[in-house]
Structures are given as C-alpha cells and as structure tokens.
Amino acid sequence: MSEAPNRPTVLTEVDGDVWRITLDSPETGNALTPALAADLAAALADRPEQARAVLLLANGERFCVGGNVRSFAGADDVGAFVGQLAHDWHEVIRMLLSCPVPVVAGVHGAVAGAGIGLIGACDIVICARTTKIRPAYVALGFSPDGGTSWALARSLGAPRALDLMLTNGELTAAEAHLAGLVARLVEDEDLRATAEQVAREMATGPVRAMVRTRALVRGAASRTLTEQLDEEARLIAESAADPEGREGVRAFVEKRVPDFRSPR
C-alpha cells in the first residue's frame, strides 16, 4: 500500500522539555519508505534547542514493520532502490546514536526488519508486553540493514542472533527484555504513559552526562579495559567541569535537589 502524496509520515510536538516524534503511517504498519526516512531525519534535525529528551512513538497497531516490500516490488532497479533506502535509513540511525540528548522509545505491536535497528539505536526502550519482534529478512532473501544485525548481536550474542535471523524466528517482548534488546516491559495500556514519564525524567537530568554515559556504554565492547578506563577518566573530567557537574556537586553539598535545567 502506498502512502498518500505529500502526507507527512512523522508527527512532531514539543511537550515541555521533551521533543515527541511519532511515526504516523499506520495504514502501512509504519513501514520504511524514502518518505519516512526523510521525515524522521528532518524531525531529529529540527529538535528545538530547549528540548532535553526525544521520545519516539508510533501510531497504529504496529510500531514499525520494516521496509515497505510493495515498494520494492515496484522499483525499476530493486537493488539500487533498496540500497539507497538503506543508506538514507542509516543516516537516521546515526542521528539517533549521536543525538545530543537522551532518546526514549515506546514500542508496541510489531517490530520487524529495519525497525529493530531503529529501537536498537535508542537509549531506553519501553516495550508493551504483547509486542512481537521478527527480523524477517531471510523470508525476502535479504541480509539485514538498519543496524539490525548490530542491535541483535549486541543484545543476544552472535549464536542466538544468528539463530533468530537465519531461521526467520521471532522474539516475544519478554524474550527481548530478558536478552536486553529492550530496557523495560510494561502492560500494553501503560506503554505511552510510562514512555512519556521516562522521557520527562530524562529531560530533568544532566543530559550531557547522560550522553557521555551512552558513549561509554556503546563503545565498551570495542575497547580494551585500559582504553575504557582512559575514556572514563577523560569523560568524567569533562562532566565535573561542565555546569551540570558543578551544579550536581553544589546541590549535594547544600543538601538540595539539583537543577540541571538551569545549572548555576
């Protein structure tokens, strides 16, 4: 099913300190298309400076079912079309990974294909209990894209990730939570409220220290312990010198709650 011409596939809204981004192509299951990739990249780039956290949600019954296979079938050169789409989507993934504020996702329904890489690039993923996660690439004769192989290998480990991907397997939300692909598991009816609450909590915190923490955690697997210790020392020094760090120390000494929104 194709999208209506010029219809936005992503909605954005400022909610206090939170920049809410909602995938809004429910009729396709929020399937990945060139328009969705472009709209999501634009939404991330347009984050208002005052927004201290990003909240990623989706309208409809499914969060993101991966690529729009009907559009693949209609392409004159399917290899070139899919390759360009992957390139565009990978820019979105890089923008999420380098976002200057924390990113929270509320996930429900179905997550497939490149949608797995999308949630894997978010910092905290809140998942509804009935969610199903399926790579689905081998059913098309495709190899993964969108950071899906990275996200699954990082959370499940290579043997389980390969078993899942090569057999066209499926993860329940509980299995994804146990494996570490998603951070929290909640009842379906509590998903949006929980995700919004977590995003607001992130927005009140020391966001630059959180981003440094993300960099440490993301990079830990590719560093030696000595390299990780050096990076920790460098970044904690930056944090201590940052207005956030100075405010946190003063608040501790003065026995008050720190104000990281307006550090003194």
Image: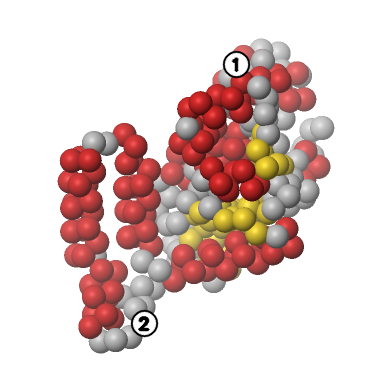
Q: Nearer the viewer, residue 161 or 218?
A: 161
190 lies left or right of 154: right
Rendered image: mark on residue 257: 2
* Residue 130 percent coordinates (x, y): 73, 50
Identify the residue at horizontal 72%, vertical 30% (top origin).
68
- Which quadrant is the C terminus positioned in? bottom left
Identify the residue at horizontal 21%, vertical 65% (top origin).
240
Amino acid at circle 2: Val
* Of labels 2 and 1, the one closer to you: 2
According to the image, what is the colour scheme of the structure?
secondary structure
Which quarter of the figure has residue 85? Answer: top right
Mark 1 is surrounded, within 10 Å at the Cα level, by few (under 14), some (14 to 19) or many (20 or more) other residues, namely few
Above or below residue 93? Residue 13 is below
Q: Is residue 137 visible?
A: yes
* Residue 84 percent coordinates (x, y): 57, 23
Residue that label 1 marks = 80
Give the mark nearest the N terminus, 2 or 1: 1
Amino acid at circle 1: Ala
- Which quadrant is the N terminus positioned in? top right
SS class, disc 1: helix
Question: Are the residues tagged 2 and 1 within 8 Å (C-beta)?
Answer: no
Q: Is residue 81 visible?
A: no
Q: Nearer the viewer, residue 21 or 3?
A: 21
209 lies left or right of 70: left
* Residue 229 percent coordinates (x, y): 20, 47
Number of marks drawn: 2
Which quarter of the figure has residue 25? Answer: top right
Identify the residue at horizontal 32%, vertical 60% (top origin).
209
Identify the residue at horizontal 18%, vertical 41% (top origin).
226
Q: CA distance from mark 2 to mark 1?
A: 54 Å
SS class, disc 2: loop
Rendered image: mark on residue 149: none
